[in-house]
Amino acid sequence: MTTLTITNPILIDIPMPIETDRLIIRPPMAGDGAAVTAAKAETPDLIRWMPWAKNAPDPAADEAVMRKASADFITRTDLMMIAFERASGVPVVFTGLHRIDWHARVFEIGYWARTSARSKGYVTETANALTRFAFNALAARKVIITHADGNDASAAVIRRLGYPLEVVERYGTTLPDGAVVDQHRYARFDTNGLPHLDVRW
């Protein structure tokens, strides 16, 4: 059994940004709301999976979310992040470490990509980088990724990263249209077997 020193999460140092050869991943900042609005506007299929996507794109509302996420990052209650394409500076993947248990050191990775950034491997690269970051920078014991039944694109990312299936929770999640479907949960306990990726922070 591994024992970690318990500390106030706000005192935990979290090195940023996370960088790969193609991406720069950092927490949200004031001023990011407009970019989020633009990404949501070009990605209408989000409404199938994300309850918050039911609301029309709203720059003021998205800016408020980004500022709240920035504050949550500082207090370590949630670690939302944005992956920017290094070559263009455009935000391509919206991601983070969520549902954090700092005592157990358990984190859940979430992600979505704007339509124009899909089929380029950015989501897999982002999730790979965050998996490595969680274990190597934050002393994770367990990293989780979930997907709703039928979300084949998300499932493909999880398979590419070699996450083993932990459980299928029957009727475990409700989709924005009200359908209640199974939720598939995958978990890693180390980085063994992850696809190679040069990542630094």
Image (cartoon, rainbow, N blue to C red):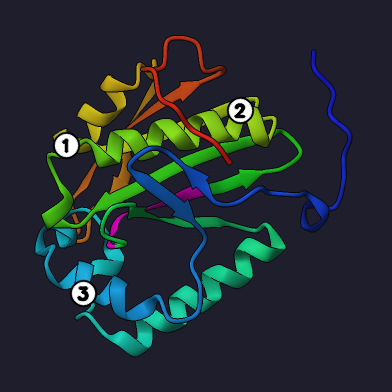
* Magenta segment: 90-97
Q: Main secondary structure of the magenta part?
A: strand
Q: Which residue is mark 3?
A: 38
Q: How far across and how far down the image is residue 64, in percent?
A: 45, 83
Q: Which residue is mark 2?
A: 135
The answer to whether 99 appears left or right of 37 in the picture is: right
Question: Which callout, 2 or 1, points at the residue further toward the start of the chain?
Answer: 2
Asked if one can make out residue 182 in the rendered structure from this viewpoint, the answer is: no
Which label lies toward us, 2 or 1? 2
The answer to whether 109 appears left or right of 56 in the picture is: right
Q: CA distance from mark 1 to mark 3?
A: 21 Å
Q: How far across and how far down the image is residue 109, in percent?
A: 45, 41
Q: CA distance from mark 2 to mark 3?
A: 32 Å
Dot 2 surroundings within 10 Å: few (below 14), some, or many (20 or more)?
Answer: many
Eyeballing the image, is 9 above or below 120? below
> On residue 106, which mark appears?
none
Secondary structure of residue under mark 2: helix
Q: Quadrant of the C terminus?
A: top right
Secondary structure of residue under mark 1: helix
Give the camera-side residue of 153 and 85.
85
Q: How far across and how far down the image is residue 44, in percent?
A: 10, 64
Residue found at the far bottom of this picture: 60
> On residue 153, which mark appears?
1
The residue sitting at 36% across, 85% down in the picture is 61
The residue sitting at 58% across, 34% down in the picture is 134
Q: CA distance from mark 2 to mark 1?
A: 24 Å
2 and 1 marks in contact (CB < 8 Å): no
2 and 3 marks in contact (CB < 8 Å): no
Give the camera-side residue of 57 and 121.
121
Question: Which callout, 1 or 3, points at the residue further toward the start of the chain?
Answer: 3
The residue sitting at 26% across, 30% down in the picture is 157
Amino acid carrying mark 3 in the image = Ala
